Amino acid sequence: MSELRITLVQCDLRWEDPDANCRMLEDTLGELDGSTTDLIVLPEMFSTGFTMNSREMAEPMATSATVAWLRDQAYQRGCVVTGSVAIMEDGEYFNRLIWARPDGSLAYYDKRHLFRMAGEHERYAMGHERVIVELKGFRLLLSVCYDLRFPVWLRQQPAQGEHFEYDALLCVANWPAPRRHPWRTLLQARAIENLCPVIGVNRVGEDANGMAYAGDSMLVDFKGEPLIDEPRDTPFVATGKLSLDELQAFREKFPAWRDSDHFSLSDGVGP
């Protein structure tokens, strides 16, 4: 049976202090490694908090100390480590989800939907490509925070002759406490409509702007039922398992995908 072990890391973040956050996370992760997990998931902008100071805080992709730290953690621990980082590349700034593998290779996804209520669309460039990565037989669609509100962007879009495009959806976030109900509801809704598990990791604490974060990090199964559910505003580290065999069996038993609507996305749509 193909299983994927996923570790959710819900933590408080030091404002705009990458060194302190990386040290804190090393302590938090402790002895976690490939013997106990396949994937460690950190929150959105885990090294800085959700900063709009992109010109001051974004790190050049080629020389980013935070990206190097992710790569080193993946290598040392023998598992994938992922989280988003403020990145500068080719004169633009991105909220970039980095997928660091133990062999030193990277994949990344640039956040598509930028949170205009905080001015993110004025400080960062919009991503244009959906990104799917593979791990232990699972295909995972990557997303960041505000993306979760846009079901068309995250909807299964299988190629001709295929039934499913991906097997799990991953979303990292700095989702504020006043909107904790939508966060929890949307994680479950995306699971139900896409017939796939959803991994959602949020932060806790309060940032320098006085915004509080309630956490509510969850691992949700293909029916929208929580496997890990921490409805509290304190840090935690928890590991859960997903079974590809169970997922495939459910999709065969409940083939709602046969009645899905086919569509395509065109690039160049405004933010």
Image (tube, rainbow, N blue to C red):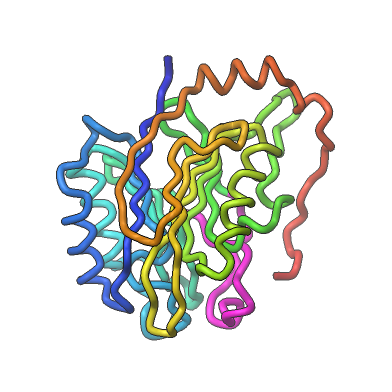
Q: Position of residue 52 (x, y in %)?
A: 47, 81
Q: Is residue 174 left or right of residue 65?
A: right
- Is 167 placed above or below 219 here? above
Looking at this rendering, what residue extends furthest in the front direction?
232
Location of the N terminus (image quadrant)? top left
The residue depicted at 57 percent of the width and 80 percent of the height is 118
- Is 198 placed above or below 182 here? above
Q: Is residue 121 left or right of residue 133?
A: right
Tell me which corner region of the image, top left, top right, bottom left or bottom right, holds residue 228: top left
Q: Position of residue 40 (x, y in %)?
A: 33, 45
Q: Position of residue 80 (x, y in %)?
A: 33, 42
Seen from the viewer's position, the closer of residues 231 and 130 is: 231
Figure disc tally: 0
Q: Position of residue 172 (x, y in %)?
A: 47, 56
Q: Is residue 132 left or right of residue 59?
A: right
Q: Is residue 190 left or right of residue 21?
A: right
The residue depicted at 48 percent of the width and 67 percent of the height is 95
Q: Inspect this view and state whether residue 100 appears.
A: no
Is 131 included in the stretch rendered in magenta?
no
Seen from the viewer's position, the closer of residues 173 and 69 is: 173
Tell me which corner region of the image, top left, top right, bottom left or bottom right, holds residue 148: bottom right
Q: Inspect this view and state whether residue 4 appears.
A: yes
- Is 106 placed above or below 19 here? above
Is 117 included in the stretch rendered in magenta?
yes
Magenta range is 108-130
Location of the C terminus (image quadrant)? bottom right
The residue depicted at 21 percent of the width and 41 percent of the height is 32
